[in-house]
Amino acid sequence: MKKIFISSDHAGFKLKEYLKNFLSKKKIKFFDLGPTSNKSVDYPIYAHKVAKKVKINKNNVGILVCGSGTGMSITANKHKNIRAAQCFSLKSTKLSRLHNDANIITLGSRLLSKKKACSFVNVFLNTKFEGGRHIKRIRRI
């Protein structure tokens, strides 16, 4: 069973809460790993929390939100078997899953509208890895 873990920093908190509402309306179960307010926090703490949960099971996925999506992506990618993709368009989101088997999506709350962020999460959760020629490339990461 796929588990979805979501987290943010203070800059991404409002968008994280919006995404939680979006997931709830679609009856998609998720686990919020914090923070619980928009009080200033250090994004690496929350990126590490999600990455540790995602790597427990190959079916787990994560959603990370910060101001740009960059810091969360860099931090999560420090973990073995994590492929965090900073997504900025529907195409980049779809390709992150199809070709790279991304298991965490990172989003920039200062760069995306709420509507776009929801559409990216929807594509991320519903796109399957193509496998094939991409498997050997994933193994080389």
Image (cartoon, rainbow, N blue to C red):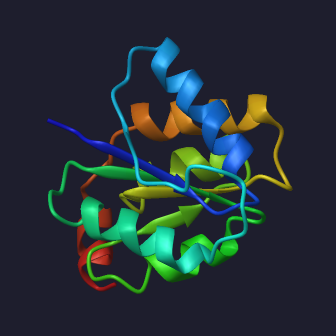
Q: Quadrant of the N terminus?
A: top left
Residue nearest the observer in this picture, 118 or 15? 15
Give coordinates of residue 75: x percent, y percent.
51, 81
Give coordinates of residue 120: x percent, y percent.
62, 38
Above or below: residue 22 compared with residue 126: above
Residue nearest the observer in this picture, 94 or 71? 71
Residue nearest the observer in this picture, 74 or 46? 46
Above or below: residue 28 compared with residue 6: above
How many marks are shown on the rendered structure? Answer: 0
Residue at horizontal 28%, vertical 60%? 54
Residue nearest the observer in this picture, 63 or 18? 18
* Residue 42 quadrant: bottom right
Q: Is residue 42 left or right of residue 97?
A: right
Give coordinates of residue 87: x percent, y percent.
65, 55
Q: Is residue 86 left or right of residue 114?
A: left
Q: Quadrant of the C terminus?
A: bottom left
Give coordinates of residue 11: x percent, y percent.
76, 60
Residue at horizontal 85%, vertical 56%? 110
Q: Is residue 67 left or right of residue 57?
A: right
Residue at horizontal 20%, vertical 48%? 59
Residue at horizontal 24%, vertical 74%? 136
